[in-house]
Structures are given as C-alpha cells and as structure tokens.
Amino acid sequence: MTVDDSPLLPVVDEDGAPFWEYAARGELRVQACASPACGELRFPPRPCCPHCGSFESAWREMSGRGRLWSYVVPHPPLLPAYAEQAPYNAVLVELAEAPRIRLAGNVVAGPDAPLNSVDPARLRIGAPVRAVFCPAGPGGGVTLVRWLLER
C-alpha cells in the first residue's frame, strides 16, 4: 500500500540515493567510513568522512531500533497541506547502534497509517521505537522510514 498523505517528500540526491534504495527494500542502512583506520557512521550521507577526510564509504545495516530523542506536535500544523492530519507528531529518533545519529520522521500506528494515528499523549522522550517502511507519493516513488512505539 502507498500513502499519499505526505505532501512534503524527500529530495533524493546522489549522496543519499542509497539510503532511499535500501529503504525501498525494507532495510535501514547508514553510511559509514570505509577507511580501516576510521569506520565512523555518518548521517546525513555525504561524499567525505567528517572524522578522517576519507572519500571511501559503505552502507551498514542497522537493526531499525532506537528511542525517541525529541518530538514536537505542531499547533497549528507547520504546513497547510498537513492541516487535515493534525494533531500529528514530528520526531527525532536516536538509533540504538549509533546514538550520535538521529533520524527525523513520524511515530505511526502502522506502516501505512496516517500521521495522526498515534495519540500525542503516548509519546515520551526515551520511548523505544522500531522502523517501518512505507512507500509514499505518486506511484510510491519513495519509501519513507516511519516509527512504531514498542512496549
């Protein structure tokens, strides 16, 4: 199923294209420095490692588990196109394997659930979450990473 309730879709650039390709396969991967002396994970993707300067990179699979690092429930909605879905959440998730990496998204009740499918009162900083993947936009052109609360 494809959700078309996301009028604001990501712009896929050359550096980030592999992230979206893996997401379309249901995999959460993060770019890593491929230099044997470094190996640092990095996000957002970029051509050069900010730690050692190497241009070598690889994509490491993550478990898809994390915790809510921050969230907001916009009142009123930030964009008019989202007004019908209010109240909805916008979250930052800290990845379990890479606490310095935080991904933006939404906590939803299921992969293809609307943005307002989780009561904002259920959100708590530190709450465990796991990634789910949902094709979005016209024809499912991009797969979004969304988050489910774990209990």
Image (spheres, helix red, strand yellow):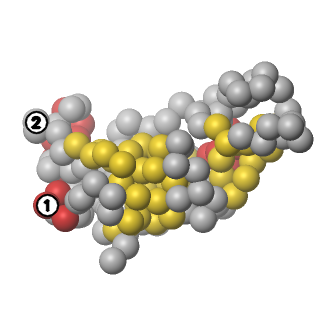
Q: Secondary structure at mark 1?
A: helix
Identified at 19% across, 64% down, the residue is 122
Residue under numbered circle 2 = 76
Residue sitting farthest toward the right: 36
Q: Is residue 71 left or right of residue 53?
A: left
Q: Earlier in the sequence, mark 1 or mark 2?
A: 2
Mark in front: 1 vs 2: 1
Q: Secondary structure at mark 2?
A: loop
Residue under numbered circle 1 = 121
Name the spot of residue 120 as percent of width and height, x first. 17, 57
Residue 9 falls in image quadrant: top left
Binning the other alpha carbons within 10 Å of mark 1 as few (below 14), some (14 to 19) or many (20 upward) gives few
Name the spot of residue 43 as percent of width and height, x first. 59, 37
Contact (Cβ within 8 Å) of mark 1 with mark 2: no
Identified at 42% across, 50% down, the residue is 93
Name the spot of residue 92 as percent of width and height, x first. 38, 45
Q: Is residue 91 left or right of residue 141?
A: left
Q: Is residue 33 left or right of residue 23?
A: right
Count of numbered tags? 2
Name the spot of residue 135 as percent of width and height, x first. 51, 56
The three-letter amino acid code for the residue at tag 1 is Ala
